Amino acid sequence: MKPLISPTKNPISIAVFVSGSGTNLESIYKEQKRLEKSGDTNYGRVDIVFTNVPKCRGEERARSLGIPVVSLGSKDYFEILNKGVDDDSVRDYYDAATITLIENICKPDLIVLAGYRRRLGSLFLNRYKNRVINLYPGDVTKPYLIRGVDASIQALRAGEGSIRCTVFLARENERFGPAMLQSQPISLEGYSEKDKDEIEKRIREEGEWIIYPFAIHNLIAKGRVGIDENDNVYIDGKRMNKSGYQFSR
């Protein structure tokens, strides 16, 4: 078992990737500022935000927080090459350009995908092996999950009484890599599919905005997370089951 990151006396460097509103970025940044004020030293510092959707709300949010932003429009990039946005033959070119842009600013210890809507290829994931994390607003261990249907709707259709969101490690050609951390159960009792927007608001407030900062600042940055050659996740030296660490207040 090897730690994802070995802590030092300095904050770890983070690059946050966004394509949309950037609300998870803001929750991560707010926890960073709280830890800075507390005098803590082992936490994550957002050094750069990257977006593949120039001028998206996430970019505006980052700039308002004073975080440097770099962007490379994926739609325009692939159109110039006359390729589809999911063409694997040029994916590595785009990822290489992305790496160059962010590493001109900093050398990130951790890549945080916060509503980033592009699939990363082998070149990128090998560059930052075991250091790319993502978040899903549902339980990635559930067998009923399919693409194209919101997690909350799938949970309701499966008769679930609650839902958990999950922080996981990104893997090539896998929708979900190993689960690192899950939120407390968020009740679905009394809700139906027409309440999707209200449920998703609860998932963000009671799940995502709590566990993503916790995973970054309190687990990874402090050297508490490890992984072995079989993709088993460890927290504080203890092997987790397939659901990962279960967050509780």
Image: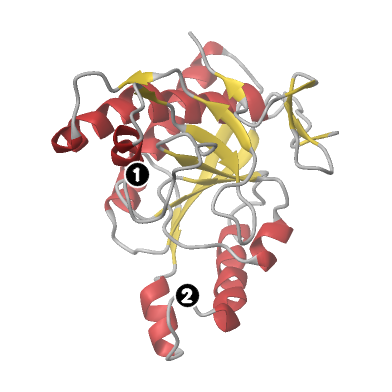
Nearer the observer, 77 or 61: 77
**How far apart in space, not on screen, are marks 2 and 1 (Cα)?**
23 Å
- Residue where numbered disc 1 is placed: 22
- Residue where numbered disc 2 is placed: 86
Q: Position of residue 140 (x, y in %)?
A: 51, 39
Mark 2 or mark 1, which is nearer to you?
Answer: 2
Crowding at mark 2 (Cα within 10 Å: few <14, some 14-19, many 20+): few
The answer to whether 63 appears left or right of 178 in the picture is left
Mark 2 or mark 1: whose residue is earlier in sequence: 1
Crowding at mark 1 (Cα within 10 Å: few <14, some 14-19, many 20+): many
Callout 2 touching callout 1 (CB < 8 Å):
no
Q: Position of residue 217 (x, y in %)?
A: 58, 26
Amino acid type assigned to the residue bearing label 2 in the image: Asp
Nearer the observer, 214 or 60: 214
Q: Position of residue 231 (x, y in %)?
A: 75, 42
Quick one: SS at disc 2? Answer: loop
Q: Which label belongs to residue 164?
A: none
The answer to whether 47 appears left or right of 161 in the picture is right
Residue farthest left in this picture: 194
Residue farthest bottom in this picture: 82
Residue farthest top in this picture: 249
